Image (cartoon, helix red, strand yellow):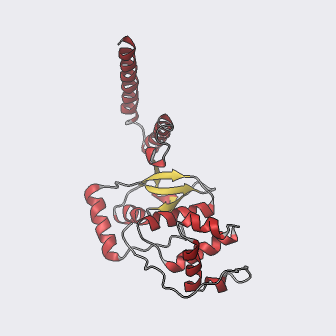
Amino acid sequence: MNDLFCNNASKENILKTIRTALDQGKAMGEPQRVSVYNAVQAWLGDLVADLCPDPACSPRLFPVALVKANDYNPNKVAMPEMELLEQSMRADGITMAVVVMRDEVGNALVVDGFHRHTVASKRLGRKYIPCAVIDRPLADRMASTVRHNRARGKHQVDLMAALVKTMMGLGWDDTKIAESLGMSEEELLRLRQMVGAARVLAGEDYTRSWGVRTMDAATEGNE
């Protein structure tokens, strides 16, 4: 019982100290407050890293100017869905962090959430965007974008083919590409055939043959 009391007392002391420090921090300027927020979020992520080591546990705030769209996102949202997304974000705020990866100059490249970022920055006039940060090389960034889109049933065939071409140029084989994009190798082969990727990738040695089959329709939706 004494140990339990001591543990509770320690917890209360820690929380009181944190609360007092954060209340004092409200008097700081905007950049300093954002910097403190991001540092504390990183510490909080470390606090529970053994229980939940996920980027969602420690979102960071990035200035809008540093959050950049990628050029490999095979996903589009029609205007009515964009309007609905804006209505939702005006009513409820940003309820899901934009997923980003840092580049070599400090920008945050969007992996998932481009449309949320667009609405927040261009329609709502937000100065900062809450972001969940992951850290991986280019091909892994592309694969992450596709996985996020495919998990919601959203991707476009032509841009998917461009991603495949880039990944092959980076040395990825068919098995690794298919696994990373959540595709079977048969889907990968059909994708190449439909978009003429075999011609684009001329010079590669493809020994398997396949028949003409219709690829499952891609569903465009709201991000």
Specify the farthest residue to the bottom: 212
Q: Residue at x 63, y 67 (%)?
A: 175
Specify the farthest residue to the top: 2
Name which quarter of the figure residue 129 lies in: bottom left
Can the viewer see residue 139 in this picture? Answer: yes
Which residue is more in the foreground, 203 or 85? 203
Could you say where residue 63 lies in the image, as x and y percent from the top left? 47, 54
Could you say where residue 222 lies in the image, as x and y percent from the top left? 36, 69
Q: Quadrant of the N terminus?
A: top left
Q: Residue at x 68, y 81 (%)?
A: 201
Q: Considering only vertical position in the picture, is 127 above or below 34? A: below
Can the viewer see residue 69 in this picture? Answer: no
Which residue is more in the foreground, 108 or 179? 179
Q: Considering only vertical position in the picture, is 137 above or below 4? A: below
Q: Residue at x 41, y 54 (%)?
A: 97
Specify the farthest residue to the left: 91
Name which quarter of the figure residue 204 lies in: bottom right
Could you say where residue 107 lies in the image, as x and y percent from the top left? 56, 57
**Left or right: 75 as drawn, with respect to 124:** right
Could you say where residue 100 lies in the image, as x and y percent from the top left? 51, 57
Q: Quadrant of the C terminus?
A: bottom left
Q: Residue at x 48, y 34 (%)?
A: 47
Q: Considering only vertical position in the picture, is 84 above or below 57? A: below
Q: How many marks?
A: 0
